[in-house]
Image (tube, rainbow, N blue to C red):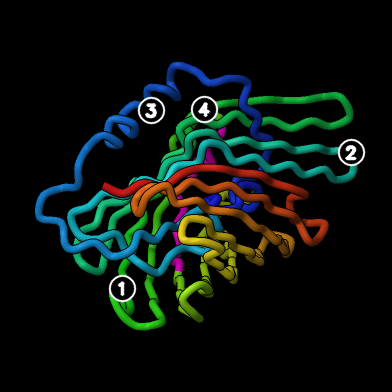
């Protein structure tokens, strides 16, 4: 997600710590739970197997079927990093990716961080802020393989809109994501992704180029239980190279309802030390 999500510390430096759920967060989530009770939209095309962008960093190359809505929600996403006397923790609660199938090969997505609390501690001193996170809008276009074949490729441009809260980057950003999916067997699949970002530079008030690449291996352990392992690399003009490993489990309650959980581990000093996350995906 991002983080899936995107990786939290890679794109939102600072400490995030949730004190407790609040009324604002519940108000943001209410429409999501109302949608859980809705049937599929009329006129939807025959369903392809549901494919999600979470929980790993590597995005899916498959789009949501036309006329359908898919929700991918993180219950929480936590990361911790400690380096030379400074400790950073960050939480994002209720991050939601709302997807709508536009055509047989494309979908429109909106990612919202419903609630975030950020802070940082150094030698006993700490600061903490909270607010509604920035909003990201993405358009995924599948180039081939949506409904047939052993490979699929998509392009997904995106733009991030600042909300100017205490946890906002306070600047517009954007980029291009290119995911590739490869079916290796009935139970094993490989996902590869390249991403280039135009990220705001707080020191110069300008923009820097950042790059992310990832590879994930998905394994179906049973008809309902899945496992994935992934490696991620991040680099940029003003970013130390980061290497991360993550792994997780998915459990399909139905063909259209999947729960997930996983961990992230930093493989070098520049990367966040550890992260844990859990969430769900549903389609209507």
Q: What segment carries the magenta color? A: 167-177
**How many badges with numbers are in the image?**
4
Mark 4 or mark 3: which is in front? 3
Q: Which mark is residue 146?
A: 1
Residue shown at the point (66%, 66%) measured from the top left: 231
Q: Which mark is residue 131?
A: 4
Q: Is residue 277 left or right of residue 70?
A: right
Question: Which comes sooner in the sequence, label 4 or label 2?
Answer: 2
* Mark 2, secondary structure of its residue: loop
Q: In the picture shown, does residue 50 fall above or below 149?
A: above
Q: If you read the primary sequence from the N terminus, does the residue marked by circle 4 or circle 3 appear first?
A: 3
Number of the label disc, if any, that sits on residue 277: none
C-alpha separation, residue under disc 4 versus residue under disc 2: 26 Å
Look at discs 1 and 3 and give the one toward the viewer. 1
Is the Cβ of the residue at disc 1 closer than 8 Å to that at disc 3? no
Would you name the residue on which mark 3 appears?
28
CA gap between label 4 and label 1 equals 38 Å
Q: Is residue 142 above or below residue 138?
A: below
Is residue 162 visible in this depiction of the protein? no
Q: Position of residue 30 (x, y in %)?
A: 34, 26
């Amino acid at each position: 997600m991002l983080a899936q999500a995107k990786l939290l510390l890679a794109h939102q430096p600072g400490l995030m710590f949730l004190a407790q759920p609040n009324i604002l967060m519940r108000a943001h989530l209410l429409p999501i739970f109302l949608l859980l009770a809705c049937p599929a939209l009329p006129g939807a095309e025959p369903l392809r197997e549901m494919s999600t962008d979470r929980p790993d960093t590597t995005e899916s190359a498959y789009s949501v079927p036309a006329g359908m809505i898919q929700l991918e929600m993180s219950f929480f996403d936590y990361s911790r990093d400690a380096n030379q006397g400074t400790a950073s923790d960050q939480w994002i609660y209720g991050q939601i990716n709302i997807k709508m199938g536009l055509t047989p090969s494309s979908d429109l997505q909106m990612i919202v961080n419903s609630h975030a609390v950020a802070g940082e501690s150094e030698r006993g001193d700490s600061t903490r802020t909270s607010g509604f996170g920035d909003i990201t809008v993405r358009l995924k276009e599948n180039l081939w393989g949506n409904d047939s074949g052993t490979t699929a490729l998509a392009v997904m441009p995106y733009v991030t809109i600042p909300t100017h809260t205490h946890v906002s980057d306070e600047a517009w950003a954007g980029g291009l994501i290119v995911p590739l999916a490869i079916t290796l067997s009935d139970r094993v699949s490989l996902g590869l992704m390249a991403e280039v970002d135009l990220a705001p530079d707080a020191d110069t008030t300008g923009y820097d180029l950042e790059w992310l690449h990832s590879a994930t291996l998905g394994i179906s352990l049973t008809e309902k239980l899945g496992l994935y392992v992934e490696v991620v690399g991040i680099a940029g003009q003003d970013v130390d190279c980061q290497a991360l490993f993550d792994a997780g489990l998915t459990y399909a309650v139905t063909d259209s309802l999947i729960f997930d959980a996983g961990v992230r581990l930093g493989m070098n000093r520049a990367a966040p030390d550890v992260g844990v996350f859990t969430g769900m995906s549903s389609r209507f």
